[in-house]
Image (cartoon, rainbow, N blue to C red):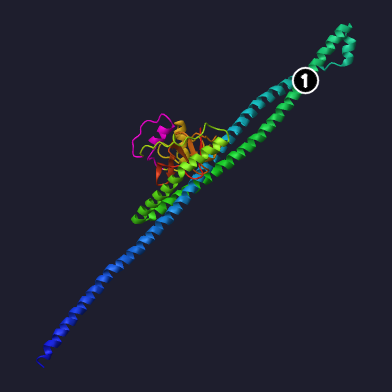
């Protein structure tokens, strides 16, 4: 029994050590593997969150750009209708003055005829001492009567024109009111969209926000690869329609200056565009505090913080077959200033602002 006890004890000690070692390994494996699994799920979720956010933000930005164009078109139509309405009102006032003058002259003529009792053909015939006197008096009376007839016709024409102008006034006033309502509705929808975009940004975690920016950069890189082909396609379309002198890809391949460079002044379209880099995206903005896409282009082209037009306006400008820095890149919902090398300066997105980026799909190059 004395020889057996040490053997059992030794065996138990060895078993205990082995069990302890086994439990330690299991614990380490559990500690290491469980967090990795959790992190993997979290990363995938954050990636999915970023991708969904980017898709939503892109869709909302397209809505903002469309609303910007519709808002600008509605305001332009409202201004045109108001100008036509005001012109009609001005003409109505002028016609009323003329009508009053004619009526006064006709009234005076009526009073003269009443006082004189008029002149009959028999009185002219019997009162004339000679044929010459008869002819002279008869001619004078006819001219006098023709003058009366002319006044009456003038009055009738003036009143008809006044009625026509009144109809124009009413129609243009109605159009102006409708366009004002359309512009107001677009502005309200845009503000709601901006609030929704801001809520999307605010809901993102730090990890998802970083992934969102990475997704955006990847998207921009893919667009950059297509930019040169888009410019060449626009130039070829203009060449076919007979405009410009032909696109030279080599001449248009000069690398653009870094976005981080500092630009001051702004004496022409391109320098003004560079000077706006970093400005915030503001829906409906024409500067200087911020810009939307057509507001930026309007400012760069004119040097004035007033809207020159919308994407709808720019799409109707002549395409060029020899794209040059300072031309306009545009599709129906977005626009920017072309700076060469397949790049443009544009008010990109809400939350991003004015940046250098590639010419986008579906764009054409036009000239102011």
- Dot 1: element: helix
In the displayed structure, would residue 154 be above or below residue 63?
Answer: above
Q: Residue at x 86, y 10 (%)?
A: 135
Q: Check the image and report above or below for 180 versus 145.
A: below
Main secondary structure type of the part rendered in magenta: loop
Determine the image quadrant of residue 131.
top right
Q: Give the residue number, with chain letter if any, for mark 1.
A: 148
Q: Residue drawn 31% across and 65% down?
A: 36
- Compare residues 197 and 343 and report the one nearer the observer: 343
The answer to whether one can see residue 153 in this image is yes
| Residue 29 in picture, x, y percent from top left | 27, 71
Is residue 263 part of the magenta span, yes or no?
A: yes
Label 1: how many Cα within 10 Å (few below 14, some 14–19, many 20+): some
Judged left or right of residue 21, residue 330 is right
The residue furthest left is 2
Please tell me whether residue 47 is drawn above or below residue 275 in the rendered image: below
Q: Residue furthest front?
A: 250
1 in relation to 155, above or below: below
* Image point (35%, 62%), residue name: 42
The magenta segment is 259-280
> Residue at position x 34%, y 55% from top?
206
Q: Is residue 85 magenta?
A: no
User: What is the x, y in percent for residue 2?
Assistant: 9, 92
Q: Position of residue 344 (x, y in %)?
A: 43, 39
Is 9 situated left or right of 38 in this image? left
Residue 312 rendering spot, x and y as whole percentages: 54, 40
In terms of image quadrants, where is residue 3? bottom left
């Amino acid at each position: 029994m004395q020889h057996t006890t040490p053997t059992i004890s030794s065996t138990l000690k060895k078993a205990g050590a082995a069990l302890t070692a086994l439990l330690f390994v299991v614990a380490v494996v559990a500690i290491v593997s469980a967090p990795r699994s959790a992190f993997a799920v979290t990363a995938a979720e954050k990636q999915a969150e970023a991708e969904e956010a980017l898709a939503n933000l892109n869709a909302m930005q397209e809505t903002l750009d469309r609303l910007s164009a519709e808002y600008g078109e509605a305001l332009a139509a409202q201004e045109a209708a108001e100008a036509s309405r005001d012109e009609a009102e001005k003409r109505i006032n002028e016609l009323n003055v003329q009508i009053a003058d004619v009526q006064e002259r006709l009234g005076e003529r009526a009073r003269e005829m009443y006082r004189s009792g008029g002149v009959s053909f028999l009185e002219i015939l019997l009162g004339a001492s000679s044929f010459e006197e008869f002819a002279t008096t008869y001619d004078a009376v006819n001219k006098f009567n023709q003058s009366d007839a002319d006044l009456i016709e003038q009055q009738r024409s003036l009143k008809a024109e006044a009625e026509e102008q009144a109809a124009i006034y009413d129609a243009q006033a109605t159009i102006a009111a409708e366009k004002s309502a359309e512009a107001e509705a677009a502005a309200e929808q845009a503000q709601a969209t901006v609030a929704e975009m801001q809520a999307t940004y605010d809901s993102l975690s730090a990890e998802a926000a970083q992934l969102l920016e990475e997704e955006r950069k990847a998207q921009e890189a893919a667009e950059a690869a297509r930019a040169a082909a888009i410019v060449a396609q626009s130039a070829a379309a203009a060449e076919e329609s007979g405009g410009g002198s032909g696109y030279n890809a080599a001449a248009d391949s000069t690398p653009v200056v870094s976005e981080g460079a500092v630009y001051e002044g702004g004496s022409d379209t391109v320098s003004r565009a560079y000077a706006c880099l970093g400005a915030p995206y503001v829906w409906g903005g024409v500067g200087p505090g911020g810009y939307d896409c057509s507001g930026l282009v309007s400012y760069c082209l004119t040097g004035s913080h007033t809207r020159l037009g919308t994407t709808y306006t720019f799409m109707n400008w002549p395409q060029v077959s020899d794209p040059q820095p300072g031309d306009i890149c545009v599709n129906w919902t977005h626009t920017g200033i072309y700076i060469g090398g397949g790049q443009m300066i544009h008010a990109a997105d809400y939350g991003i602002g004015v940046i250098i980026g590639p010419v986008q799909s579906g764009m054409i190059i036009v000239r102011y």
